[in-house]
Image (spheres, grey):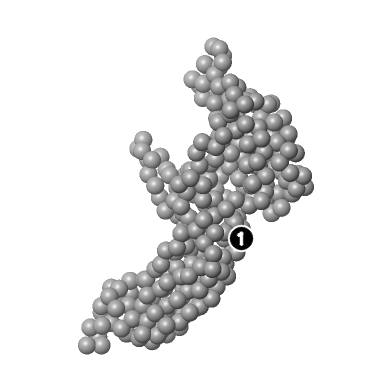
Amino acid sequence: MSMFKKVLASVGIGSAKVDTRLEEARVVAGGTLRGVVSIRGGQVEQQIDKIYIYVKTQYDKEENDRKITHETEIARILITEGFLLQAGEVREIPFEITVPERTPVSYRHTPVWLMTGLDIKMALDPSDHDYLEVLPSDNMQVVFGALDELGFRLREVSNEYAPRLGAGLPFVQEFEYVPTREFRGALDELEVMFFPRGDNLELYIQIDRRARGLGGFLSEAMGTDESFIRVTFTGNDLRRGVHEVSNQLYELISRYS
């Protein structure tokens, strides 16, 4: 009977179960999450080799003229090394982890979740999923406020396949804006990507100019109607507030619109 239970446990029947309980599911990108991983033993003792928590999300990739959604791992954090879990035993392991600064924020339809996995040799690894609400950092909030002050309206947020820009990740999070005031008639849209650099914040901005006249039409047809700009706001710039950053963005965008 014992051998039969071990065989069932190897395919997940009567095996250990894992449940992660978070103190708070809302976290700022770059902030700290605290919680407890609870493991309940199954019908037989099992050797737990390691427990990991993975920070995961999704991104879209163009494949054969279709957008395909892929899952990806932003971070893998070791919670504890191995131990022997007795049948029916309950073990609780508190943890504190830092959510990477590059974690996408939970705007629109951007899912971010934790997956807790038990590493058990010769068995189906149990896992648990917990969705997070990732909030923008204070630095990002200043830029959002500056774009709003300039009359840009957020139209869409998405994680797009871009391994060259991802700095180790296969995607970047894009914030797509449309002008409603100052730049209306000059721009079609503005795409903004955020790259935290410690106290500073680097922006990668794609400006899609509106075609005007024959020259504009030819530029659009040749794909030369877009400008790509990198700009870094220092911690001092950002601490001066929304109006300071708004002025700098206005001057920058005006040069390329």
Residue 8, given in percent of the width and then of the height, sits at 25, 78
| Residue sitting at x 70%, y 49% | 200
Q: Quadrant of residue 206?
A: top right
**Mark 1 falls on what kind of element?**
loop
- On screen, 47 above or below 70? below
Q: Which residue lies furthest to the top in this view?
A: 214
| Residue sitting at x 33%, y 71% | 124
* Residue 52 shows up from this direction: no
Quarter of the C terminus within the rendering: top right
* Residue 198 shows up from this direction: yes
- On screen, 58 above or below 187? below
Residue at mark 1: 31
Closer-to-camera residue (200/153): 153
**Number of numbered markers:** 1
- On screen, 189 above or below 27? above
Quarter of the N terminus within the rendering: bottom left
Residue 63, given in percent of the width and then of the height, sits at 37, 40
Residue 234, given in percent of the width and then of the height, sits at 74, 46
| Residue sitting at x 47%, y 62% | 114
Type of the residue with mark 1: Gly
Closer-to-camera residue (89/108): 108
Residue 187, given in percent of the width and then of the height, sits at 58, 25
| Residue sitting at x 26%, y 83% | 5
Q: Residues within 10 Å of mark 1 (few under 14, many from 20)?
A: some
